[in-house]
Amino acid sequence: MVSFLHGEHATPTDTDMALDAWETALSYLPPDAEIHVDPQYSWRSQDPRDLLSPLRPSGAWTTWTSEQTQRLWNLTVYQGTAFPKLPRQRPTTVLLLHAYAHGWATRDDLYDQLIGERPERQGYYYSTDFDDLSTYTRRTVKADLPTHPDWRAAVSAVRDRVLEVELGRGDLETPATRPALAVQGLHGAALTLRLLAGLGKNPLKRGYQGSSESRDVTFSHLTRVSFPQPGDTAASLRTQAHALKIPDSRLLDLAMFAPQWATLVAGALGWKGLEGGVYWLHAHTRDTNWSVPADVREAWEAEISERTPLSATDLTEGAVDVAWFHRTYRALGRERFAALLDAAKYASSSGGHKRAELYARAVLGELDETDLRARIREKRNQDAVRSLGLLPLARAKAKAAKELEGRYRVISDFRREARQFGAQRQASERLAADIGLQNLARTAGYTDPQRLVWAMEARTAPDWTQAVTVDGVTLGIALTPGGEASVTLRRGEKPLKTLPPALKKVPEVVALRESVTELNATRKRMRAALEEAMIRGDHFQPQELLDLAAHPVIAPMLRGLVWIVNEAHAGWWDGDTLHTPSGPQPIGDHALRLAHPHDLFVGGHWTAFQAQVMDRGLAQPFKQVFREYYPPTAAELDARRSTRFDGHHVQPTKAAALLKTRGWVAVPEEGVRKTWHAEGINVWIDTSLGYGTPSEVEGTPLTAAYFVQRDGQEAMPLSQVPPRVFSETLRDLDLVVSVAHVGGVDPEASHSTVEMRAALLRETLRLLTLDNVRVMNDHALIDGHHARYTVHLGSGTVHRQPGGFLCLIPVHNQHQGRVFLPFADPDPRTAEVISKVLLLAEDRRIQDPTILEQLR
């Protein structure tokens, strides 16, 4: 057995001894020797050459003496040739160039490293195995890579020879075929056109071709990675193409297949706008996973970013730059654009170009709206949803307004109906609907899709004052103070409870009932939309609010919420005035946004607004002033991860369903993620919420939450995360922990939830003038007539003092409507806690025998 010291504590003497020992050991080993290592060592291998692997960590030998490094080089060369039954392993490029610079290696070693014999491929494994040739022939070679003038010359010589051999090939592959597939960059129109001519009439091969080494595959790859050189001009390209008898249609294929040639091709063909058309089609294809070298694709993306304000992510998701399209179409004209569409198949590896073609036809008005709606309704086709927003609107204002409203309703319904599917499909359908609304907003001239939403909801209100009289029965619409609509029935002066069956199919009655359904649907949509607007921090112009306030269902919601103006004043909106705790504040032309609990907390008026809500008996459309708030702790401000819910075990199925409704998406083998699009932040939890696993029984543990910039890799410091984003993220996790905890037992609610319930309880006790209840340390302490009680504000657990546990079984449906909650969201646990406190505060009035028996 041979052992050695290696690592940060190894000395040069140790290294000498190790090298001598391995050199001696290797010299006695037969090629098929088996090596067994003492089990106490973590390193094991059946490959004799791996004996040297501990001696060659990256850069470790750079601190050795010249003699030691030369001996390592000799051993490396030996172990690469001494075992003919094993695949050849070559030295690292760093060690090779170091050896060459010191005269230990020759130019033949450089050529062997670049193009020496490689083993045959095994099975489906696809790799050229010419890594150095691939790395050093890229269009841009990384500056930190090792190099040498003779090495660069060797790379150029090898590339030239490979191209020379490959260009003269027939149908069968040559020894240069695999190296040719490894080449990642070449220059010059003359070479590119020779490749194009060599293909003849055969189509260019797109994307991944498996292990194919046909001439078409090789020539297509080399064409893809070719770039113009400074001396190439449109005129010279035209001349060389004519000499090689390459038709104009083939040059068009070249421009689409390798857009870096689009400028020269446009000049050679005399097609103004060709370059813009090529990049428009590439920008709007679906394909992002095909085999295009990174530096080539980066060159394309740089050109695209100069032509559109839309991000690469938006374009991939289906957003369309309509203005860019119209510029290109006007420059090219109908016939030339149609010819360009014929070549669009080279913009993707499969059928991804069909989406760009679909969008182009939609913008041109060549798609039938009825057909698109049928595809959306019957097949739930997501590209049809995106395309519907691109259809041009009629020139007549009245007709255009009607078309806009109809398309908005179709896309909104598609988004709402997505909730019936699983998390992945739900997320993709909602994304398609959001992109469809963006496209519709741009088509209609709105600067922001949210502006379109507000305008449509305000404009599409049915007439709620209408009344219908049929056979002596009068039907009308009634609205509650909160904006909920219902049908009223009366015969003369007598109210009716049910609609006579004979009237249910009368057209006027059907229309009125549909109006009620639409009003309630609008109320539900706007309640969710306003909450999302608060979470996102959207701003509203004063005129937008006035337009929305004209809607009978939306107006009560706007007046029941707290607004922020000038990022300083919070209050209740009433037309042109904001009623703040310090007095009326004129709004003027300043934009407003819905206040988040963070704003109320920082402003110092949170308690005052909670008192006002209770005094007015106001039921807000969603939790706002009594919303749970999660500010980062002092420890979290210095950290990159929040560990508040780390270690909590949850039921996977229930947790996944809850997260799905809150916009989280499960990413296989990575965790669950939520994207904050406006802020460009992804939130990750490294947890598995799979189905059909042992975790279904034992529960899945949640882990720390961390935030990452959408285009970044490292976790952000929590101090840099917007407080609103941080609070809403932890609110989602608190919901999951509270509802989906393993065993069905609700753990103690978080501090934020307890604080919310405590504030709500204090205001309720103040209004009811109950002075025998105190809130202390997450408990309500009650001095009752029969005994003293404690109610935990998190779990709702009741104890009698003395006497132990008191069993009060809640019937949650009975709390609905009986216990006032200052928000419309159903929250049975909060209603349970409040009702238990009120029940025990007046225990004289208890008549339930099962409860009285426990109190005696």
Image (cartoon, rainbow, N blue to C red):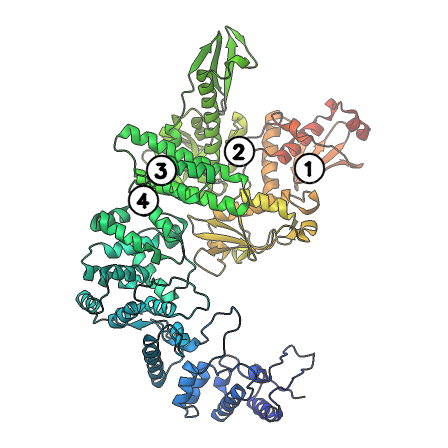
Depth order, front residue of 389/332: 332
Q: Residue at x 71, y 45 (%)?
A: 743
Tags 2 and 1 in contact by the CB under 8 Å rule? Answer: no
In the picture, the disc for residue 591 is 3
Label 3, label 2: how far apart the Cα atoms are:
24 Å
Depth order, front residue of 369/198: 198
**Circle 2 SS class:** helix
Q: Amino acid at mark 4?
A: Arg
Label 4, label 1: how far apart the Cα atoms are:
60 Å
Q: Which residue is mark 1?
A: 796
Residue 40 rendering spot, x and y as whole percentages: 69, 79
First-in-chain label (3 vs 1): 3
Q: Residue at x 51, y 16 (%)?
A: 504
Along the horizontal axis of the image, is 481 left or right of 54? left
Residue 166 position (above or below residue 25)? above
**Circle 3 SS class:** loop
Residue 570 rendering spot, x and y as whole percentages: 43, 36
Q: Mark 4, residues whose alpha carbon is within 10 Å: few (<14), some, or many (≥20)? A: some
Q: Mark 1, residues whose alpha carbon is within 10 Å: few (<14), some, or many (≥20)? A: many
Q: Amino acid at mark 2?
A: Gln
Q: Amino acid at mark 1?
A: Gly
First-in-chain label (3 vs 2): 3
Depth order, front residue of 98/390: 390
Q: Which residue is mark 2?
A: 610
First-in-chain label (2 vs 1): 2
Q: Which residue is mark 4?
A: 361
Closest to the camera, between mark 2 and mark 1, is: 1
**Circle 4 SS class:** helix
Q: Mark 2, residues whose alpha carbon is within 10 Å: few (<14), some, or many (≥20)? A: some
Residue 297 position (above or below residue 602)? below
